[in-house]
Amino acid sequence: MAEPTVPADALARAAALRAQIEQANYRYHVLDDPDLTDAEYDRLMRELEALEAEHHALASEDSPTRRVGARAHGGFAEVRHAIPMLSLGNAFEQEGGSERERFREVAEFVRRIEQTLQRDELVFSAEPKLDGLAISLRYEHGLFVQGATRGDGETGEDVTANLRTVRAIPLRLRNGKDQDESLKLRGKGWPDVLEVRGEVIMLRRDFEAFNEYARKHDEKPLANPRNGAAGSLRQLDPAITAKRRLSFFAYAIGAVEGGELPPTHSATLQQLREWGFPVSPEVDTARGFDGLIAYFQRIGAKRDNLPYDIDGVVYKLDDYAGQREMGFVSRAPRWAIAHKFPAQEQTTRLLDIEVQIGRTGAATPRARMEPVQVAGVTVTYATLHNADQVARLDARIGDTVIVRRAGDVIPEVVRVVQELRPEGTVPWAMPTHCPVCGSALLREEGAAAWRCSGGLICAAQRKEALIHFAARRAMDIEGLGERFAEALVEFDMVKTPADLYRLGVDDFVDMKQRADEREPAPAKAGGTTPETVKAGKVATKWAENLVDGIAASKHTTLPRFLFALGIMHIGESTAKTLASWLGRLDFVRNTPAPVLRLLPDIGGEVADSIEGFFAQPGNQQVVDELLAEGIRFSDETAPSPKLRGKLDLANLLDMAPIGQLGPKRTRLLAEHFPGLQQLRDAGAAHWVVAGLSQAAAVNLANFLDDGAASAQLDRAEAAMRRLLDAIPAATAPSGLPLEGQTIVLTGTLQSLGRDAAKEKLEALGAKVSGSVSKKTSFVVAGAEAGSKLDKATELGVEVWDEARLLALLEQHGAAA
Ligand code: IVH
């Protein structure tokens, strides 16, 4: 059959697309200057794929669509390297003072070459030592034909199909002089056979992205970028390699036939760049020992900020003639050396997993290990981040683990060596109780964090608790700043906020003196007697003011107090909600979570946190002590009458996870049975009569049979009862719009006068009062309002201007 002809426009379009795609790869990987977004790149790829699918004759081996090929059956074929792939000798830092001593292996390396070649001031190519997998790429007539791993240096594995998926590797060489045209040209400028060697690596951002994905999809995360690169390349299915984004940097040349390369290594790397190979931008030249060490220090300082992992730098004598003269010893060239950084990862044994409680109660597991040197520092502890991370690592006491310390960051356990796990280890679990105070550790819903619930009594949280308690928006204790709050805790003068109320002037003078001695307050020299006396007087005055401030804080409001307790998730607004709905502290501290959830804006997590806090006897005791010290709330009232509609059997049952029993059905039950007792007494047959399906009735019966679940419902119902009993009986409603509102008028009302205003408001059902109290709904302040306005501001009563009053009257058809 004759080959179908491809229309000229399709041919041209395919060529243009290929050129654009390869240009994008080149700009991304070689120039590090991408010009297309991922989405644009993908669109071009899809268009080319569609075109090639339509016109099969368009397909060609070096099309970018062919990067993902077929799976290798039964492993990889062997490849014998025409020129062996060498390894490098290492230079490590030694003990010593001067650079020549510490880097004596580098000094000897340089001296050996200078002696042999009888030259000094030698030029070296200085390069990062990339931490990935060495490979060799073979190009014949400018086309990529084979790629192999290093293997033992003589023989490697044929991983061509996988390497084709690495976009940083050119499938055909570019002609450096004529970039876009070059994609159509072949065989210009490069040797007939060219082997380019370099490192396949995984960039840190691609490693992070892959692990993020793996964690979300419950796949095994990669231990480090190096394993990511090596593991991905040795995948039998190139589609898997393609999904893990790999990168490549060229750093050496293998076989060269039918052509010539420049006489130095640095010029060759430049030539490779022009042919389309990525070369690390950190590659440089350096002169003599001093130049090499300066490079080493410079890259070392940049190490943590590079986009990829490196484990040192490599120095190579730049000119090839000199390299030939130096030759090899065993498998390592005498003209190159790897100058290694201290290792960032080490293996050691995990002795224990301890739980630390932070200032805010967060519980974090950390590993205690057999001490080990990592990057020049002895490491005994490493972070395990959180309980989920321990589970992901499956770290167990007794395991051999790999710890990593990079730069200034806290050492972390990155991996467990499963193969070395001793027998009899058990998976680790978060302890149920705080190691510091013994209160229950609670898990935050949906978050990885565990927290200690002993907010007021936990020594680990004392400082933070006290600072928060005294803060302006909480108890507003004037004069007690962060510094002194911390000192009080450190000197063991305050264990819980209640202790604060038991301290006297002398205690505070004492504390201030100790705090100032430890860390003198700025510009206050002591010494001569008159000044000390003066300082003593100042301290006494300060302490007296503080004691006054503490005493004044006893007169507070319920929301401030609730906020001050520092209950997890209870901000000012939730504290206000609790106060306005439940009215009294007593109800807040005794209402179970399911009932709290009925309040607006209080979800399960918040309700659990409140219940959990008050479930700790220690916290309750501190609250009692605070009350005993005389803390009083100016705004305690009865629970809100609005609660009435919420506290019934239907809502109670809605909180329980009972299958087939939705809100419609629970409502029907509530209409028939006033409470749990009546519901139980009636029995399943009557529930069905009331409108339940058989299935729902069975589920409900089972639920009520479960002792623990049933008891919880009973507790919730009892709490509902207590609240209901405390709600004041409603006065008969008049049906007027301002019924129940108490309004105070003050100052001169310009447009209608106080008397007229009073009349109109009363006609709408409001009570107009002559004095402001905390029961006042709002104060209308006209011109020159005086003490009543001040009182309103002091009590936090809402203040209206005249315009707003007029708007209200207008709204109810009572305007002037
Ligand atoms: S040159 C004749 N240059 O280090 C020298 N190697 O220990 C051949 N490596 O197998 C290697 N970065 O995997 C060279 N800039 C660099 C390198 C580098 C990393 C690795 C490579 C090699 C190993 C030798």
Image (tube, rainbow, N blue to C red):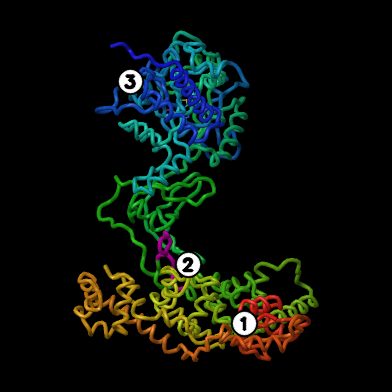
- Closer to the chain start, of discs 1 and 2, is 2
Separation of marks 1 and 2 at Cα, in angstroms: 25 Å
Give x and y (percent) for residue 638.
50, 87
Q: Which span of residues is magenta-colored?
A: 443-454
Q: Is residue 281 left or right of residue 385?
A: right
- Closer to the chain start, of discs 3 and 1, is 3
Q: Quadrant of the N terminus?
A: top left
Q: Quadrant of the C terminus?
A: bottom right
721 and 571: which one is in front? 721
Q: Identify residue type, mark 1.
A: Ser
- The structure residue drawn at horizontal position 50% and vertical position 52%, both measured from the top left corner, is 410
Q: Quadrant of residue 452?
A: bottom left
* Magenta stretch encompasses residue 813: no
Q: For the residue labelled by badge 2, is the local secondary structure a helix, a strand or a loop?
A: loop
Q: Nearer the viewer, mark 3 or mark 1?
A: 1
637 and 735: which one is in front? 735
Q: Nearer the viewer, mark 1 or mark 2?
A: 1
Residue wearing tag 2: 361
Give x and y (percent) for residue 70.
31, 27
Q: For the residue labelled by badge 3, is the local secondary structure a helix, a strand or a loop?
A: strand
- From where the camera sits, is residue 328 visible? no
Q: Which mark is residue 761?
A: none
Tell me whether the residue at label 3 lies in contact with that at label 1, contact meaning CB atoms closer than 8 angstroms: no
Q: Quadrant of residue 48?
A: top left
Mark 1 neighbour class, 10 Å CA radius: few under 14, some 14 to 19, many 20 or more: many
- The structure residue drawn at horizontal position 48% and vertical position 32%, both measured from the top left corner, is 41
Q: Which mark is residue 553?
A: 1
Residue wearing tag 3: 79
Secondary structure character of the magenta stretch overall: loop
Q: Identify residue type, mark 3.
A: Val
441 and 85: which one is in front? 441
